[in-house]
Image (cartoon, rainbow, N blue to C red):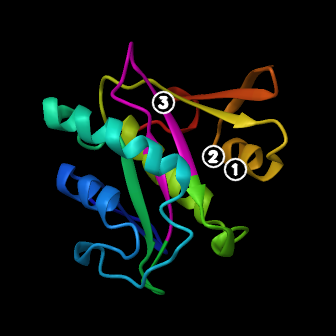
Amino acid sequence: MDLETPRLILFPLSLEQAQSLMTETNQYPKWLNVPFDSLWPHDGLKALLPIYAENIETDDSHYGFGPWVAVDKHKEVVVGDVQFKGKPIHGEVEIGYFVSNIHRNQGYAKEAVEAIIQWAFQHESIHHVRAVCDANNVPSCRVLEACGFKRLGEDNGIIHFKTTKQRNHAI
């Protein structure tokens, strides 16, 4: 189920991969096959992994609707991740993403977000993708807008975004 972009390979974590990332914190598991980077996985992903592992352990249809690892296929390094925050509900999924500090401002986030949106919209049941962004995180807000998301509003310093299958990701 890997996704490939001009620079990235994105792949969803299996149950075993999520579990190994939770336990092997001072090195990457052998299956990752890239040099260790202490900047990844980040704290947000570490917090998500146990929830995702439990979800996928009880219902394997969660596979693909959790974290995806983003690897630069030319440099053979993890640059970050993009994740769904669960399976679709009423035709909608929410995404989040992270790019390690040393890989930021190089277009990786936009490339990963565009790929994962296209993957989501290939599912007949998904019609909307949502995202939230801290209002102070201007670069991240720009990524979402560049990927076709529209601002829905702001609540307590968090901007809500949404894109639709019909808007600019028609399959």
Q: Is residue 55 above or below residue 9?
A: above
Q: Which residues are magenta?
A: 79-97
Dot 1, crowdedness within 10 Å: few (<14), some or many (≥20)? some
Instruction: Tell me if residue 121 can be seen.
Output: yes
Q: Is residue 73 above or below residue 141?
A: below
Dot 2, crowdedness within 10 Å: few (<14), some or many (≥20)? some
Q: Earlier in the sequence, mark 2 or mark 3?
A: 2
Observer-nearest residue: 46 or 109?
46
Foreground: disc 1 or disc 2: 1
Q: Is residue 156 above or below residue 31?
A: above
Q: Is residue 82 magenta?
A: yes
Q: Earlier in the sequence, mark 1 or mark 3?
A: 1
Amino acid type assigned to the residue bearing label 3 in the image: Lys
- Badge 2 marks a residue whose secondary structure is loop
Which residue does the image show at 46% across and 43% down from the upper left? 47
Q: Quadrant of residue 123?
A: top left
Q: Does the CB distance between marks 1 and 2 fall below 8 Å?
A: yes
Residue 31 drawn at (x, y percent): 23, 73
Q: Is residue 10 left or right of residue 143?
A: left
Q: CA distance from mark 1 to mark 2?
A: 6 Å
Residue 81 drawn at (x, y percent): 48, 57
Q: Mark on residue 143?
A: 1
The residue to which callout 3 is attached is 165
Q: CA distance from mark 2 to mark 3?
A: 12 Å
Dot 3, crowdedness within 10 Å: few (<14), some or many (≥20)? some
Amino acid type assigned to the residue bearing label 1 in the image: Val
Q: Is residue 170 magenta?
A: no
Residue 153 drawn at (x, y percent): 77, 19
